[in-house]
């Protein structure tokens, strides 16, 4: 992307307040010693003036990373009373930030008066694209500015693009093999594929994940691809492949497990579990008018899935694929997914709610595993014959 003006100090401070790295040991040894001269703090209050702090910081600027220096200068200007506690400075540099320190950063940003990112003029096509992604995926203006100024397109959104290309490739291969592209699921040999989840073959654990590469037909694939590209790619550009991959895969696994518990006789195909996890997490995290397009696509895709499930099967007594995987994806999205997307810079291991939802997801997975081992026998279900 082209040149951008450097982010304002308060903008940098807001983002950095959640993710500043600890200085290397040798860097910590070069930090300025706590001021002992009473002229810095004549009242012995534990605070020094912001002007004094700025002078001290600039006198040691050669020993600090330039970006961290800008963050520290923003901190000096963030208090309304013109004073700063030396301990806040130490906490910032040692990554031991307190709630009061974070609150001071937020207060400083509330007083920041700068024009909105949407008002920027003369942007190139790539700059306008990144600005659009920022407004589509981030709810706070301060985060949008920080993302816009810092995004480098390295690495690119490879996860969602790779998954989408693989799904299209498998669909085309199956279409050629079956000689059918529309409603492939009605073909008598469709369920013989080793990637489809089938209740009689639930012991083959890979099927709980690989079913995403099989779709009911071109209409099914098309809707999922549209959602993955419109929602998944921008989300990955902001949050990274690790977070988005985690939500997507968690939604996929939860989708097939939900079917094995709630719709025990039905097979499962399609990537809707992962797609619905991403979209529901996004919609729950940021409510914007522009998301109405995604809501319409979601409604169409879910309606198609419900219709297909209850439509007379082309290969009785096995029903058509279940739509419950969609609901499993939604459950993951509005719990685990919202926590992942809530703050695109905050580390997940620092969020207590994250661990709560991880524990809930783990309990569900364990419950579904034991359900699949014992419930089918205890309930004496009549399952469709294996493909």
Image (cartoon, rainbow, N blue to C red):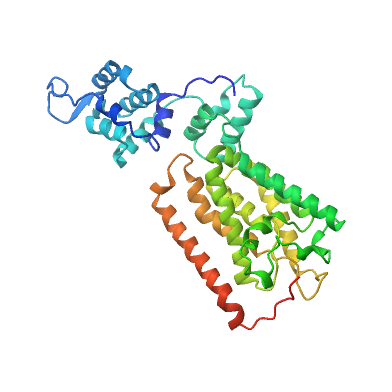
Q: Is residue 156 left or right of residue 34?
A: right
- In the displayed orientation, state which residue is furthest to the right: 179
How many discs mark residues in the rendered view? 0
Question: 172 above or below 200?
Answer: above
- Quadrant of image for the N terminus: top right
Residue 58's x, y, as percent? 30, 17
Q: Is residue 151 left or right of residue 31?
A: right
**Residue 61 % position (x, y):** 32, 18
Q: Is residue 327 visible?
A: no
Give residue 20's position: percent from left, percent from top.
Answer: 38, 34
Q: Split into 4 quadrants, where in the image is the C terminus?
A: bottom right
Across and down, in percent, residue 357 comes to: 46, 57
Q: Going 79% across and 56% down the picture, which residue do you hit?
A: 217
Q: Nearer the viewer, residue 94 or 169?
A: 169
Q: Is residue 247 visible?
A: yes
Give the residue drawn at x 55%, y 57%: 332
């Amino acid at each position: 992307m082209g040149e951008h003006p450097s982010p304002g100090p308060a903008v940098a401070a807001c983002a950095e307040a959640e993710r500043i790295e600890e200085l290397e040991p040798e860097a910590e040894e070069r930090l300025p010693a706590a001021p002992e001269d009473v002229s810095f703090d004549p009242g012995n209050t534990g605070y020094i003036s912001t002007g004094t702090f700025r002078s001290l910081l600039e006198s040691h600027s050669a020993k600090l990373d330039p970006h961290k220096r800008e963050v520290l200068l923003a901190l000096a200007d963030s208090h309304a009373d013109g004073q700063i506690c030396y301990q806040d400075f130490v906490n910032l540099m040692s990554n031991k930030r307190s709630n009061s320190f974070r609150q001071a950063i937020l207060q400083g940003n509330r007083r920041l008066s700068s024009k909105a990112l949407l008002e920027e003029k003369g942007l190139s096509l790539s700059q306008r694209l990144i600005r659009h992604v920022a407004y589509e995926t981030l709810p706070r203006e301060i985060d949008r500015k920080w993302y816009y100024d810092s995004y480098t397109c390295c690495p690119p959104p490879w996860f969602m693009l790779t998954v989408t290309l693989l799904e299209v490739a498998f669909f085309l291969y199956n279409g050629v093999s079956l000689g059918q592209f529309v409603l492939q699921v009605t073909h008598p040999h469709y369920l013989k594929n080793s990637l489809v989840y089938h209740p009689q073959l639930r012991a083959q654990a890979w099927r709980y994940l690989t079913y995403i590469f099989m779709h009911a037909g071109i209409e099914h694939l098309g809707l999922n691809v549209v959602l993955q590209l419109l929602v998944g790619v921008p989300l990955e550009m902001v949050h990274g492949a690790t977070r988005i991959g985690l939500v997507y895969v968690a939604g996929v696994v939860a989708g097939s497990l939900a079917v094995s518990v709630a719709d025990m006789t039905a097979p499962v195909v399609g990537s809707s579990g992962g797609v619905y996890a991403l979209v529901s997490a996004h919609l729950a995290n940021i409510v914007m008018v522009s998301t109405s397009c995604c809501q319409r696509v979601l409604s169409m895709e879910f309606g198609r899935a419900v219709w297909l499930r209850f439509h007379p099967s082309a290969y009785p007594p096995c029903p058509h694929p279940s739509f419950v995987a969609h609901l499993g994806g939604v459950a993951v999205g509005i719990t685990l997914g919202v926590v992942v997307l809530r703050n695109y810079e905050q580390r997940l291991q620092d969020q207590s709610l994250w661990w709560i939802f991880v524990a809930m997801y783990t309990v569900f997975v364990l419950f579904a595993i034991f359900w699949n081992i014992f419930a089918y026998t205890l309930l004496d279900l009549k399952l469709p014959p294996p493909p």
